[in-house]
Image: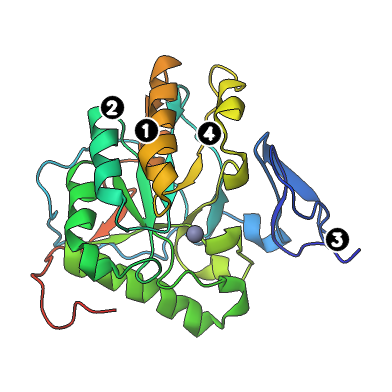
Amino acid sequence: MKGLTVGQCSGIGWAGATTCVSGIVCNKQNDWYSQCIPGTATTTTSTTTSITVPTNTTTAETNQPTSSGTELPVGTLYTGCKVSGTVAITFDDGPYQWTSALIDSLDAAGAKTTFFMCGKLYGCIYDYANVVKKAHASGHQVAAHTWSHSDLTTLSVADVQRQMTKINTAFQKILGIKSKWMRPPYGAANAQVLTTPRKYGLQGCNSVATSQSIFNALGNDPKIVPLEHDALQTTAQTLGPWIANWAKQKGLKTVTLSECMGEPIPSGQYTTVGGATTKDSTWVC
Ligand SMILES: [Zn+2]
């Protein structure tokens, strides 16, 4: 068998390939996620200076949550929470028509979550600018899931950069921020992708495995990062709010990805560039 060069190779609910290419072992991250990582991909040194944070920044929102902590290095894959008692629910592939009502449900449950957004997938992000603003203003973390949901391992370095620049340009125009976090579509990242200066939040569980029975079977402090899809009606209307409620009943705090990682907020989440703009003719996909 040829085996995987990168990506998930085991975990609860995982039905894909389970062997890595010769020379790489399937590294267990937690019960939910094991991955094939090339040797260079786990290096956490020398990449922390890759992000330039402007010093003359202003935040787009004045009611954003803040907290102190230690910012994680970029160029690294993260798969589970570090802070005990927290769960970081993540929603991928939006914004779409179900996202706004999902935010209402989450806010009503007192849950902060993370939205890994695309620029152009189910919808065009500029057409959902008010939803993006609503998520951010409610204290949810807004993060990147590439512009058009590409498998980054099939692209050139320049095209990977374009995928990230384009979605962050949209975030800058709409929110006045750029995301430091991204999740590669299909969980597909290789050493080349990891050279782009981002923190990579991979899933703590496979979307196929997000059944209520699996959540109910978890231990008291699973530190999971569930991956859901807010572009799916059933997830946005039923499963997403259900997970938030499940966490609450277990006494777990549903927080943003950065908070569950113990990062400072908002500096762990965003390179704040300031200057959100109003809608103009460039707000198109
Ligand atoms: Zn996706």
- Determine the image quadrant of residue 4: bottom right
Q: Residues within 10 Å of mark 2 (few under 14, many from 20)?
A: some
**Label 2 with label 1: CB-CB less than 8 Å:** yes
The residue pinned by badge 1 equals 241
Circle 2 — which element? loop
Label ID, residue 109: 2
Label whose residue precedes the other's in the sequence (2 or 1): 2
Q: Hey, which residue is sitting farthest right in the picture?
A: 1
- Determine the image quadrant of residue 210: top right
**Label 3 with label 2: CB-CB less than 8 Å:** no
The residue pinned by badge 3 equals 23
Q: CA distance from mark 2 to mark 1?
A: 8 Å
Estimate the x, y position of residue 155 in percent, counting from the top left: 57, 80
Residue 198 placement, left or right of 128? right
Label whose residue precedes the other's in the sequence (3 or 1): 3
Label whose residue precedes the other's in the sequence (2 or 4): 2
Relative vertical location of residue 95 with respect to residue 203 in this rendering, above or below = below
The residue pinned by badge 4 equals 224
Label whose residue precedes the other's in the sequence (4 or 3): 3
Q: Residues within 10 Å of mark 1 (few under 14, many from 20)?
A: many
Circle 4 — which element? loop
Label whose residue precedes the other's in the sequence (4 or 1): 4
